[in-house]
Structures are given as C-alpha cells and as structure tokens.
C-alpha cells in the first residue's frame, strides 16, 4: 500500500496525529506539514477515506522499513501447501505399493496434500473395482497421518483420490480415542 507523503497531500483539512499517537486535531495540510518539518519528520496520510483524512507525523523511511520487515517475517513463517502426486497401476506389486505408500507418508509429514492416481490401460478399464480397492487400501494404510479429502473417483482413464495431512487437533483426538479403547479393552480382559 502506498501512502501520500508530505507535499503529495492536497487535502484542504486533515486530522493530525503526533508521532507519540496523541491527537492534535483538525488543521490545514500546510500547517500540519510545517509542524512535521519542525520535528524533522514526515506527514503521512494513513486513512485517506476518512472525513477529514487522517495524517500521522512519523519517520516514513523507518515506517516502510518496519512494514517490510513484518511482511518478510510473515512470509518466512508461512508454509505453502503443495499437491504431490503418487501414480500407480492396478497391477502394482506389494513392494512397489509400499514404496509409494512411504513416499506419500513423507509428503504428508511435510504438510503437503497428496493426489493418488491409478491409471488404467486398455482392458484394465473393464476392472475399475481393482483400482478402487487399491486406493481404499492405500487410504486405510495412510489413515494414521492423513484424512481422506476426496473419495476415489474415475476421471477418464484415471481413478483419483486426495489425502490431506491430519492436523494436530485430529492427531490429539485420535490418540485420546486410542487410549480410551485400550483402557476399555483392559477392563474387559479383567
């Protein structure tokens, strides 16, 4: 967001706030600019839509530096979720299946969504239920770290489903449920 500064402010009257945050009242833009220059600071219009517009006396260079620093900090802490894809065929062997499963769990642990796709070729299209069973088994084995976002769905020659990582809240609820079931099983065995 760009601000109008010093001579760029063309309004007849402005509401002025001092560098300490104190309200100085409504005055002409020229008087406010003189006041700011006497303090070796800038007059910055911070709320142009207000009537009259609100201007603050501040060090604009320092203000811009702090804004850029805040934005950089926000961007640094932000994690961009990517969609990773795992492709399989209906005739996948258990070893390859386990490798794909391990990769999907790694992607989920990194906080990314996973698109799991089964590609049917030729006569395999007659047996799409094999692909559906494969995807359901995959989702079941990822169940401890993932939620099923989109159930297996046939789109052309591909059957696709989406998995997303479980949140900390989901993991805590699952742990609590598992502990309650273990306690209940223990009581039944006694």
Image (cartoon, rainbow, N blue to C red):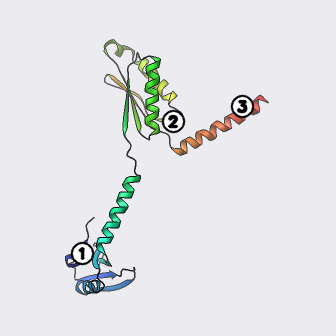
**Disc 1 designates what residue?**
5
Q: Is residue 47 above or below residue 27?
A: above
Q: In which quarter of the image is the N terminus?
A: bottom left
Q: In this view, does 126 lie above or below 109?
A: above
**Disc 2 designates what residue?**
145
The tag earlier along the polypeptide, 1 or 2, is 1
Residue 46 visible to an observer of this rendering: no
Mark 1 in CB contact with mark 3 (< 8 angstroms):
no
Give the crowd class for mark 3: few <14, some 14-19, many >=20 residues within 10 Å.
few
Residue 30 visible to an observer of this rendering: yes
The tag earlier along the polypeptide, 1 or 3, is 1
Q: SS of the residue at dot 1?
A: strand
Separation of residues labelled 1 and 2 (CA atoms): 52 Å
Q: Which of the pair 93/158 is nearer the observer?
A: 93
Where does residue 26 sit, x and y in percent of width and height?
A: 31, 85
Q: Give me the residue at 56% from left, 41% from top.
A: 171
Q: In which quarter of the image is the C terminus?
A: top right
Separation of residues labelled 1 and 3 (CA atoms): 71 Å
The tag earlier along the polypeptide, 3 or 2, is 2
Res 39 → quadrant: bottom left
**Disc 3 designates what residue?**
185
């Amino acid at each position: 967001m760009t601000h109008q500064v010093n001579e760029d402010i063309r309004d007849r009257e402005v509401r002025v706030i001092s560098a300490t945050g104190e309200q100085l009242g409504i005055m002409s833009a020229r008087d406010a600019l003189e006041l700011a220059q006497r303090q070796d600071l800038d007059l910055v219009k911070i709320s142009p839509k207000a009537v009259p517009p609100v201007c603050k006396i501040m060090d604009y260079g320092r203000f811009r530096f702090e804004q850029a620093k805040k934005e950089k900090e926000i961007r640094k802490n932000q994690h961009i979720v990517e969609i990773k894809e795992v492709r399989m065929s209906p005739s996948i062997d258990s070893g390859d299946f386990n490798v794909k499963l391990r990769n999907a769990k790694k992607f989920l642990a990194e906080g990314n969504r996973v698109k799991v796709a089964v590609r049917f070729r030729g006569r395999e299209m007659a047996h799409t239920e094999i692909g559906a069973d494969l995807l359901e088994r995959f989702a079941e084995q990822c169940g401890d770290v993932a939620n099923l976002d989109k159930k297996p769905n046939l789109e052309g020659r591909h059957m696709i489903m989406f998995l997303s990582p479980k949140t900390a809240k989901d993991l805590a609820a699952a742990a609590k449920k598992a502990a309650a079931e273990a306690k209940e099983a223990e009581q039944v065995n006694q």
